[in-house]
Image (cartoon, rainbow, N blue to C red):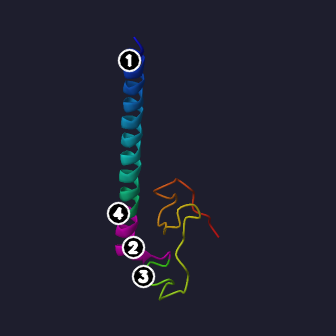
Amino acid sequence: MPFNNINKTLKKVNRTVHTVNKTQNTMRNMGNQVKARQQQRAQESAWKCACGQLNQSAFCGTCGKAPVMCPMCNIIIETQFCPDCGTPVETE
C-alpha cells in the first residue's frame, strides 16, 4: 500500500517537471524570437524623416531632426502608433 502512494507522488512530480520544462522551452523560444526581431530591425535601420529624406544615421541629413522613437520599445516609429506596443507618436 505505501508504494502506491509513492508511485502516485512520483507521477505528480514527473508531470510537474514536464510542465516546467515545457514552460522553460516556450520562454526560451520567445526570447529567441525577440532577439531575431531586434537583429532584423538593426539591419533595417533606414528611416524616413518627416521632411521626406531617407536616412540611415542618427539625424536627418536634410533637416537635422532625430527620428521619432517609441519610449516603451525604443524603436523608430514612422506611423502614428508604435507597431509593437501601440504607443501613440508624440507630436511636437
Magenta segment boundaries in residue numbering = 36-50
Say what amino acid the circle numbered 4 marks. Ala
Q: Are marks 3 and 2 in contact (CB under 8 Å)?
A: no
Q: Disc 1 vs disc 2: which is toward the camera?
A: 1
Residue position for label 3: 55
Q: Disc 3 vs disc 2: which is toward the camera?
A: 2
Q: For residue 18, which quarter of the picture?
A: top left
Label 3 – label 1 distance at C-alpha: 71 Å
Residue position for label 4: 36
Instruction: Residue at 62% x, 64% y: name it.
Output: 90
Label 4 – label 2 distance at C-alpha: 10 Å
For residue 29, above or below residue 6: below
Residue at disc 4, secondary structure: helix
Q: Disc 3 vs disc 1: which is toward the camera?
A: 1
22 sits to left or right of 65: left
Instruction: Residue at 65% x, 70% y: name it.
Output: 92
Residue at disc 3, secondary structure: strand
Query: Which of the two discs, 4 and 2, labels the residue nearer the N terminus?
Result: 4
48 sits to left or right of 69: left
Query: Which of the two discs, 1 and 2, labels the residue nearer the N terminus?
Result: 1
Residue at disc 1, secondary structure: helix
Residue position for label 2: 42
Q: Residue furthest toward the front?
A: 2
Say what amino acid the circle numbered 1 marks. Phe
Is residue 35 part of the magenta span, yes or no? no
Q: Disc 4 vs disc 2: which is toward the camera?
A: 4
